[in-house]
Image (cartoon, rainbow, N blue to C red):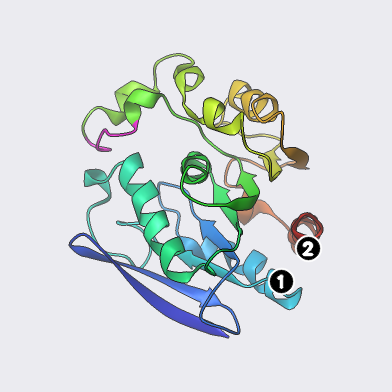
Amino acid sequence: MRKKIVVPFQQDSLLGDMISKTDQCELFCLHGAGTSDRFRFDRLRERLFKKGVSSCAFDFIGHGETQGELVHSSLRERTEMAAEVIQGYAPKDQSIAIVAASMSGYTAVRLLEEFDVRLLVLIVPAAYDNRAYDLQFDQGFTACIRREKSYENSDAWEILKTYQGKILLVTAEYDQVIPDGVVDLYKRSAPLAEMDHFIVEGAPHKVMAHMSDEVVDALVDRIVIAER
């Protein structure tokens, strides 16, 4: 049931796939930065499909099978890329679920301003200073986010204040990338949401690669329960 998709974006094409019985999906997966790609979610998505949950995942520009220059992109463009995919494959007039890792945790929060999202699965999510949103990754972005506690200036916290869906926050016990302060703010900034916290014991930041099949199954069960 896996089908390839191609979504035009500016001068590039975003490559991805759906695991679905139809031409629409109810859950969208957004991978992180660095060397990450959509294939990090394969085990999770395949198990979700067995439980009746269809999904879509794609590679951001400069990742996986999608061409283009990663360094010339930005957080704003990542939000726009995800929006293009969701608009193309989400059921009309229905809420969706988003699974987002690391950098894309912030992207998922920004998407709350555009879409009806019933469930956010935030896997070791990052958060960024408002001023970093429009900066290209090779033009001041790193310097901006490396300021001490710059994440406290993120607009993510204001957006989450009014979110009334469900949040499954997945954190790694030994995450050396995401500060504890970011995790605390994610837990405190959505007072109207139904929050569940899943800690992957013994895991570093690259938590998806660290998960055993048993842990993936446990995460799938949490997602399926939240989807009900």
- Residue at image coords 70%, 69%: 48
Q: Would residue 173 appear left or right of 92 to someone viewing this image?
A: right
Amino acid identity at mark 1: Arg
- For disc 1, the marked residue is 47
Image quadrant assignment for residue 224 = bottom right
Q: Position of residue 226 (x, y in %)?
A: 77, 54
Numbered disc 1: secondary structure: helix
Q: Extreme left residue here?
A: 11
Q: Would residue 19 appear left or right of 133 to someone viewing this image?
A: right
Q: Is residue 136 magenta?
A: yes
Amino acid identity at mark 2: Asp
- Residue at image coords 49%, 54%: 31
- Residue at image coords 47%, 27%: 155
Give the extent of the magenta segment: 133-138
Judging depth in this view, the residue of 132 and 143 nearest the camera is 132
Q: Extreme top residue here?
A: 148
Can see residue 145? yes
Numbered disc 2: secondary structure: helix
Q: Would residue 114 appear left or right of 165 to someone viewing this image?
A: left
- For disc 2, the marked residue is 217
Residue 181 disc label: none
Judging depth in this view, the residue of 143 and 225 nearest the camera is 225
- Residue at image coords 71%, 71%: 47
Q: Main secondary structure of the magenta part?
A: loop
